[in-house]
Amino acid sequence: MPKICVFPGDGIGPEVVREALSVLRTVEEVAGGRSFETEEELLGGASYDVHGVPMTERAMGLACGADAVLLGAVGGPKWDPLPFAVRPERALLGLRKNLGLFANLRPAKVFAPLLDASPLRRELVEGIDLVVVRELTGGIYFGEPRGIRVENGVEVGINTEVYTRPEIERVARVAFELARKRGRKVTSVDKANVLEATELWRRIVTEVHDREYKDIDLSHMLVDNCAMQLIRHPKQFDVIVTTNLFGDILTDEASMITGSIGMLPSASLGGRVGLYEPIHGSAPDIAGKGVANPLATILSVALMLRYSFGMPAEAVWIEEAVEKVLADGFRTGDIYREAPGVRRVGTGEMGEQVRRAVRKQAEGAVRNIVR
Ligand code: NAD
């Protein structure tokens, strides 16, 4: 039986993971025949409070031995004063490194019922369906030399952007493979006009394309232009592939376009075990109140079914169930606007509505087969 390692984490993490897992149980029920073993462990601040470290060896072993990892969120003001080495966020870096997760996929899709939640005009966002593939384990966040030192009596801060050929080739392949399952279009984003590391990036992405993915439409864009184009004409994008630093910034920009941080899932891939989590943090300001939006975590389960377990039909059930629940007017506080037919609900009720809609999706699918 496939095994999922579950890290609810801190803040709203346990609240949203509870709902996501129970949607997974509903999928098991209605899919008939596929079931999953799940095992939970502490991570982040919750682990520090009990064990004195943000991630124990047991937790790491559990993640490495599983077939996929589902994570809520880690961190919070309680642990902010801790030394860097035991901060909750360190657990995430450790996980990514040990699981070899070099590609972070963040879909940004606008759900029709939420068009008005976007800060952009309706006609600009209607129909947006893009994915940013961010390189996750290289680039300036890891390059050496780094640090702050005094040279000739002057303080200097140093970081280094480094990319090797294999690092670029493997993330380019992830983007091209993904494009094959979507709109067959990749935009590679760099700053090749001033940064040599990204001049290499552009050359190697082009080589991989010309050698292995001629069926994909590849274009290159400078990062400053991409930041502008995401606002000006976001519908032009299908798959964007970019470096760690540029991806960090562009994914936040892309997520804002869709309206709410509580709606967006993510997948980190590369090794044998994929990691799935909402893009939001632990939201300490609303933790424990039962008002968090669980949809990003529920949609992360859909990504897990699609990418780790080869269950695309079941992934679509969840995604369509979410769309249906929104169309029926159910909203958590973060996406709520007063309007006729719109109802404000808490975390648990939102989860329950999605479970109901998944059951209906599955029944509809069975009826279609019987016909
Ligand atoms: P955040 O994403 O936790 O919250 C930002 C704002 O969005 C808050 O107002 C919050 O209430 C709201 N929000 C976020 N998710 C929501 C949801 N599901 N439903 C409704 N509203 C939601 O970002 P932050 O406040 O900058 O960070 C809080 C903590 O989370 C920090 O300790 C940070 O380090 C950590 N963090 C962790 C991760 C992670 O685990 N991957 C990612 C980002 C931040």
Image: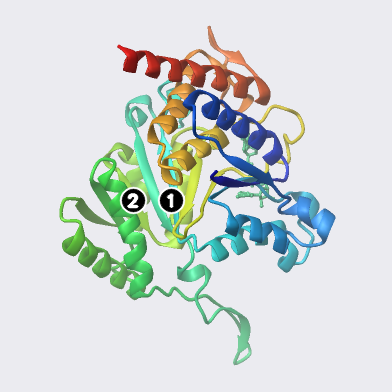
Q: Nearer the viewer, residue 269 or 116?
A: 269
The part of the image, by quadrant, that contains residue 86 is: bottom right
Q: Residue at x 48, y 53 (%)?
A: 268
How far, Cα to Cα, is label 1 from label 2?
10 Å
Q: Nearer the viewer, residue 247 or 99?
A: 99
Residue type beneath disc 2: Ile
Image quadrant, ligand 1: top right
Q: Nearer the viewer, residue 21 or 118?
A: 21
Q: Is residue 265 visible?
A: yes
Q: Which residue is mark 1?
A: 250
Confirm if mark 1 falls within 8 A of ligand 1. no
Q: Earlier in the sequence, mark 1 or mark 2?
A: 2
Which quarter of the rendering shows the N terminus?
top right
Q: Residue at x 32, y 53 (%)?
A: 175
Q: Nearer the viewer, mark 1 or mark 2?
A: 2
Farthest residue, direction top: 340
Q: Mark 1 touching mark 2, by CB under 8 A?
A: yes
Label 1 Cα neighbours within 10 Å, binned few <14 / some 14-19 / many ≥20: many
Residue 240 disc label: 2
